[in-house]
């Protein structure tokens, strides 16, 4: 229970990587402020955490809406008194070649994947500064490091998250707050489930470990970075990709 007494806010906690992160952090003793748009799925998550002996509460937040972020985080702070850990996990795709990409699809991806992380950090950082302890973990992507044809908006947003991670790490290090990123490779989620079987088989051939990753693989990395075991790590991008990208 290395996170006992800590409060963790996880965005897009209703499914996929965020759901796995919320469950893993709760198993380590953290109280979970679970944020997403889907109230029903959030309630199921909260019930699952409670059934396992943990503590959690649901906060319906569309991270593309600044006012919802502000009000949702305010509610979480009012209920739990603090936020020690922030996991910026929310992300969407709107894939298209740049020559055909609509401005609305560019804006939607940047707003959800990058701007929301900045806004969430802005809302929780006061609590962390006050107590002189905090952990911020941003979920980026291997495509933010390598780029990906047809995903200029997604790759740009995830690369931006890496820059945000490093800038914030420098800003708050003196207050014992670490800011790191986890860069997943090919992970089995609803986002990748829509891909063709042929694409998946081709992708697996590029993974030295020979398998697609699971949301739990990412959640384990997040738990490590959120703990005191990672107290001397900040501004770092932890690759969890089965060896797809090395170095």
Image (cartoon, helix red, strand yellow):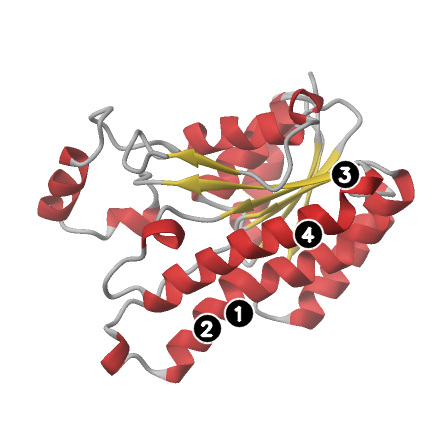
SS class, disc 2: helix
Asked which quadrant contains residue 7, the reply is: top right
* Nearer-N-terminus badge (1/3): 3
Question: Which residue is outermost to the top?
Answer: 1
* Above or below 100: residue 59: above
Query: Is residue 185 or residue 51 the one in the foreground?
Result: 185
Q: Nearer the viewer, residue 164 or 187?
A: 164
Task: Check disc 4 and report the residue beneath it.
Answer: 168
**Is 83 left, or right, of 136 in this rendering?**
right
Mark 3 lies on a secondary structure that is: loop
Point 58% across, 36% down: residue: 22
Image quadrant in which the N terminus is located: top right
Q: Which mark is residue 220?
A: none
Distance from Cα at disc 1 to Cα at disc 3: 24 Å
**Dot 2: within a 10 Å radius of its alpha carbon, few (fewer than 14), some, or many (20 or more) residues?**
some
Tell me whether circle 2 and circle 3 mark residues in contact (CB < 8 Å). no
Q: Dots 4 and 2: beta carbons under 8 Å?
A: no
Which of the image's four quarters has the C terminus? top left
Disc with the residue nearer the chain's start (4 vs 2): 2
Give the left or right position of residue 177, taking residue 213 as reference. right
The residue lying furthest to the front in this view is: 247
Residue carrying label 1: 111
């Amino acid at each position: 229970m290395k996170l006992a007494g800590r409060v963790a806010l996880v965005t897009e906690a209703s499914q996929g990587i965020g759901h796995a992160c919320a469950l893993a952090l709760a198993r380590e003793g953290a109280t979970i402020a679970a944020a997403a748009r889907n109230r029903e799925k959030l309630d199921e998550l909260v019930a699952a955490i409670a059934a396992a002996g943990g503590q959690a509460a649901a906060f319906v937040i569309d991270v593309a809406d600044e006012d919802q972020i502000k009000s949702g985080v305010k509610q979480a702070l009012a209920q739990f008194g603090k936020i020690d850990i922030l996991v910026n996990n929310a992300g969407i795709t709107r894939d298209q070649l740049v020559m055909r990409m609509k401005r609305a699809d560019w804006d939607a991806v940047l707003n959800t994947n990058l701007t929301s992380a900045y806004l969430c950090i802005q809302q929780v950082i006061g609590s962390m500064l006050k107590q002189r302890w905090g952990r911020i973990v941003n979920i980026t992507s291997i495509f933010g490091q390598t780029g990906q044809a047809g995903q200029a908006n997604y790759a740009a947003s995830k690369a931006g998250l890496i820059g945000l991670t490093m800038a914030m790490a420098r800003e708050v290090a003196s207050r014992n707050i670490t800011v790191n990123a986890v860069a997943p490779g090919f992970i089995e989620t609803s986002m990748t489930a829509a891909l063709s079987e042929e694409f998946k088989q081709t992708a697996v051939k590029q993974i030295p470990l020979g398998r697609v990753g699971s949301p739990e693989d990412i959640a384990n990395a997040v738990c490590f970075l959120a703990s005191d075991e990672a107290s001397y790590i900040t501004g770092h991008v932890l690759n969890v990709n089965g060896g797809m990208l090395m170095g």
